[in-house]
Amino acid sequence: MRACGLRLAACGLVFAIAACKKDARPPSLGEAISVEQPGGSVSTLFSQASEIPTSATESFTTGHDGDKRILIHVLRGGGRTANALHSDGWWSVDGISVSRAGEPRVMVTFEVDAHGELSLAAREEDHKLAVRKIEKGADKLAASPLTEPDDDEDTDEDSE
């Protein structure tokens, strides 16, 4: 009899824990976060219901020969064009190696904390780059392009 009572108590505890887990959902983003591409299209980084905290890494490059920085326009909301979304701000990644357009590969990590606040960090090869949010004059800027992933990049990430 006693063993049966313990089993019932244990089952009751399991049900109580399951009920608590059902009600305690992890926080999620209230709206999608995207980056603008040249031409006004957008690439979604995080969907509206993404659990937070979260992060994503994307590869960017320069749009013109000799560029030493890339500009990233972060947008929030749902839509497929930059005009349909509202601006969360422009970010500048400075200190990129001078080379021809499209050659530098800058890995930018987008992190959203538990409060929905976005931060960026960037690397080119094995050194960190300066990243800052641009506060003024952002209406005259042009977004830098995302790069297409190389097959080698996918292999390197899988082997780590």
Image (cartoon, helix red, strand yellow):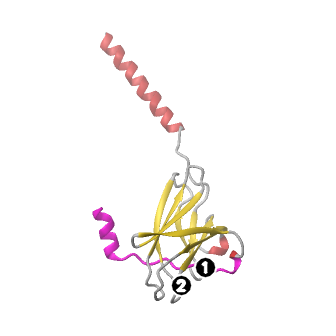
Mark sitting earlier along the chain (1/2): 1
Image location of residue 119, percent across then percent down = 56, 60
Residue 14, by quadrant, is top left
Image side of residue 150 versus residue 133, left or right: left
If the image is split into quadrants, where does the C terminus sit?
bottom left
Magenta span: 139-160
Depth check: 159 or 21 in front? 159
Image side of residue 140 versus residue 46, left or right: right
Mark 1–mark 2 distance (CA, rounded to whole Å): 21 Å
Residue 147, by quadrant, is bottom left
Depth check: 133 or 152 in front? 133
Residue 123, visible in the rendered structure: yes
Under mark 1, the amino acid is: Gly
The label on residue 40 is: 1
Q: Is residue 148 magenta?
A: yes
Depth check: 61 or 67 in front? 67
Residue receiving disc 2: 67
